[in-house]
Image (tube, rainbow, N blue to C red):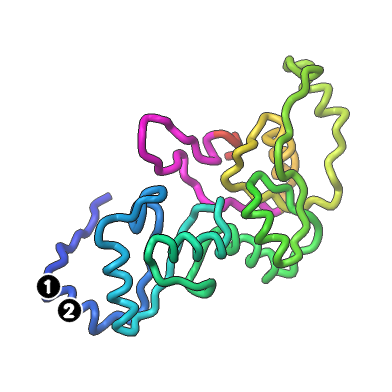
Amino acid sequence: MSKLIHQINKGLAHEIMKKIDNFLFDCDGVLWHGSQVIPGAPEAVQKLKRLGKKIYYVTNNSSKTRLQIVEKCQKLGFPADMESIVCTAHATAQYLKSMNFEGKVYLVGNSSMAAEMDALGIKYVGLGADHVSDDHGGLDDIVKFQSDWKPDPEVNCVVVGFDPHHSYMKMLKAATYAKNRNNLFLATNEDPFLPTKGEVCVPGMFMSLGIQ
């Protein structure tokens, strides 16, 4: 797929300033890397704000609540408030709220996703560690566990995001709920890998979940 690239010069920048009132910025890798800002990014966003432009921060990083992103923006020199943040943890909970969701979510996620659901009264299960016990170490034991485990009948949605406690048990349960075509399946992002610096590779959720 070809990409159309425009080289920004001073004249084009002035035209953009005249015609555009709302600016949406991705965060990770665009405004900052980890805890380090991209040189010049805070000053550019501050300038836009002084010109009366509306600034929005958009991220598919599900491991942060809107409040956490506001705090990070302000710490790094970016003007931000709750209304200027669009993040998948909040968007997922807001989507469920907007459709008058009833029942429970099986959450393959993190505490920030849970906090956004708590704020909107969305019930969920599955948060935290859920490991294979020593008594279920082989395939035969897993199959037996599967026959013994009873799915929660109130769960009618699977939500998947970044989960630092991902395990085979969580994959088994999520796949069981997602197999029911009457249940919702929501994903906060499709990254096969998370954008990080250094040699360590951080797999994204779909690589480890095993749900197609």
Quadrant of the image containing the C terminus: top right
Q: Going 36% across and 54% down the picture, which residue do you hit? A: 32
Circles 2 and 1 in contact, beta carbons < 8 Å: yes
**Residue 133 sits above or below residue 43 on the image:** above
**Residue 162 sits above or below residue 134 on the image:** below
Q: Secondary structure at mark 2?
A: helix
Closest to the observer, 65 or 3: 65
Q: Is residue 203 magenta?
A: yes
Q: Going 73% across and 15% down the picture, which residue do you hit? A: 138
Q: Position of residue 53 (x, y in %)?
A: 34, 81
| Left or right of residue 35, residue 65 in this image | right
Q: Is residue 150 magenta?
A: no
Q: CA distance from mark 2 to mark 1?
A: 6 Å
Q: Dot 2: few (<14), some (14–19), or many (≥20) neighbours within 10 Å?
A: few
**Residue 193 sits above or below residue 25 on the image:** above
- Residue under label 1, please give it: 10
- Residue 191 got which mark? none
Identify the magenta region. 184-207
Q: Going 45% across and 39% down the picture, which residue do you hit? A: 193
Closest to the observer, 149 or 108: 108
Q: Secondary structure at mark 1?
A: helix
- Residue under label 2, please give it: 14
The quadrant holding residue 198 is top left
What type is the residue that disc 1 sits on? Lys
The quadrant holding residue 37 is bottom left
Closest to the observer, 192 or 61: 61
